[in-house]
Image (cartoon, grey):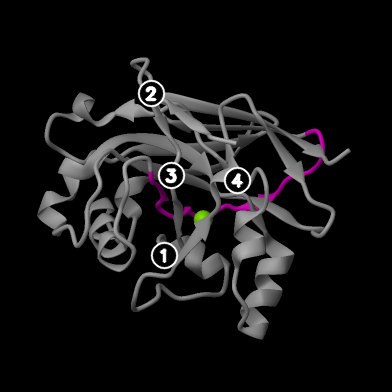
């Protein structure tokens, strides 16, 4: 099924590839027992992972430990290949808040066994994304945002994207060089510290503070 991003000014854009960045905040890397990797660690989620605002995260029965990770999501508006960092801004259509929902038990096992993360990161409903703020709102700069995540109205994650180890322009350049970038691609730029478990019935609320929110319900698969 085709999936569409909704912009706050009414535009829509079909979701293309969904990229994720691992270990991009120092304190989160520490809580995972990892270091900031020398080269960026990138993973993918299929388009079917996308969940719009107000949607439901379905817990798969293959995992007993599912985690939220709040992240800035960068939405690409133009196709590009090998984009220099200083031109990255010209390829960005907008910014959103997303939750990189992760099957932590399966990811930990995959890491230990040297196996891919596709199931742990890319399962159905693993990529909720809020409405998208048009990049034009920020007049020629890539802004920093305050990120907040609440579970059942309790704050669990709070950070600013200026704490990212690799900046948006670096990630756009790197990913475009390896994969190329397409209009409609979404980049989850990494999570700050404070990740934790979600359970059946939880309400997740994420925000780019002052700009845009994302609300999702967590449910067991029936
Ligand atoms: Mg993440």
Q: Quadrant of the C terminus?
A: top right
The span shown in magenta is: 185-201
Between disc 1 and disc 2, the foreground one is: 2
Residue holding disc 3: 16
Residue holding disc 1: 26
Between disc 4 and disc 1, the foreground one is: 4
- Residue 121, quarter of the rendered image: bottom right
Between disc 3 and disc 2, the foreground one is: 3
How packed mark 1 is, by other alpha carbons closer than 10 Å (few <14, some 14-19, many 20 or more), is: some
Give the structural element (helix, strand or loop) at label 4.
helix
Give the structural element (helix, strand or loop) at label 2.
loop
Depth order, front residue of 53/69: 53
Residue 83 position, x and y percent, is 17, 57
Residue in view at x 40 percent, y 52 percent = 189
Residue positioned most to the front: 1
Residue 16 position, x and y percent, is 43, 44
Between disc 3 and disc 4, the foreground one is: 3
Residue positioned most to the right: 222
Give the structural element (helix, strand or loop) at label 3.
loop
Q: Earlier in the sequence, mark 3 or mark 2?
A: 2
| Relative side of 63 to 12, left or right | right
Give the structural element (helix, strand or loop) at label 1.
helix
Depth order, front residue of 61/185: 185
Residue in view at x 79 percent, y 43 percent = 199
Between disc 3 and disc 1, the foreground one is: 3
Residue holding disc 2: 7
Residue 208 position, x and y percent, is 41, 32
Disc 1 to disc 2: CB gap under 8 Å: no
Q: CA gap, disc 3 to disc 2?
A: 15 Å
In the picture, the disc for residue 49 is 4
Q: CA gap, disc 4 to disc 2?
A: 19 Å
Residue in view at x 28 percent, y 41 percent = 144
């Amino acid at each position: 099924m085709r999936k569409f991003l909704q912009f706050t000014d009414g535009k829509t854009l079909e979701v293309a590839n969904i990229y994720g960045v691992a270990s991009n905040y120092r304190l989160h890397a520490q809580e995972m027992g990892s270091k900031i990797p020398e080269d960026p660690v990138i993973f993918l989620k299929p388009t079917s992972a996308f969940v719009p605002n107000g949607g439901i995260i379905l817990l798969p029965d293959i995992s007993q430990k599912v985690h939220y990770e709040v992240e800035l999501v960068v939405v690409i508006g133009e196709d590009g290949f090998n984009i220099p960092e200083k031109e990255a801004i010209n390829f960005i259509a907008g910014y959103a808040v997303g939750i990189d929902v992760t099957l932590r038990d399966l990811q930990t096992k995959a890491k230990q066994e040297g196996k891919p993360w596709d199931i742990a990161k890319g399962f159905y409903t693993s990529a909720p994304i809020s409405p998208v703020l048009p990049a034009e709102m920020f007049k020629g700069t890539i802004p920093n945002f305050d990120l907040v995540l609440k579970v059942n109205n309790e704050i669990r994650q709070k950070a600013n994207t200026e704490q990212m180890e690799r900046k948006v322009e670096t990630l756009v350049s790197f990913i475009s060089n390896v994969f190329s970038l397409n209009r409609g691609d979404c980049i989850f730029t990494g999570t700050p510290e404070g990740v934790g478990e979600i359970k059946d019935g939880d309400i997740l609320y994420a925000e780019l503070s002052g700009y845009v929110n994302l609300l999702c319900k967590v449910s067991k698969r029936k």
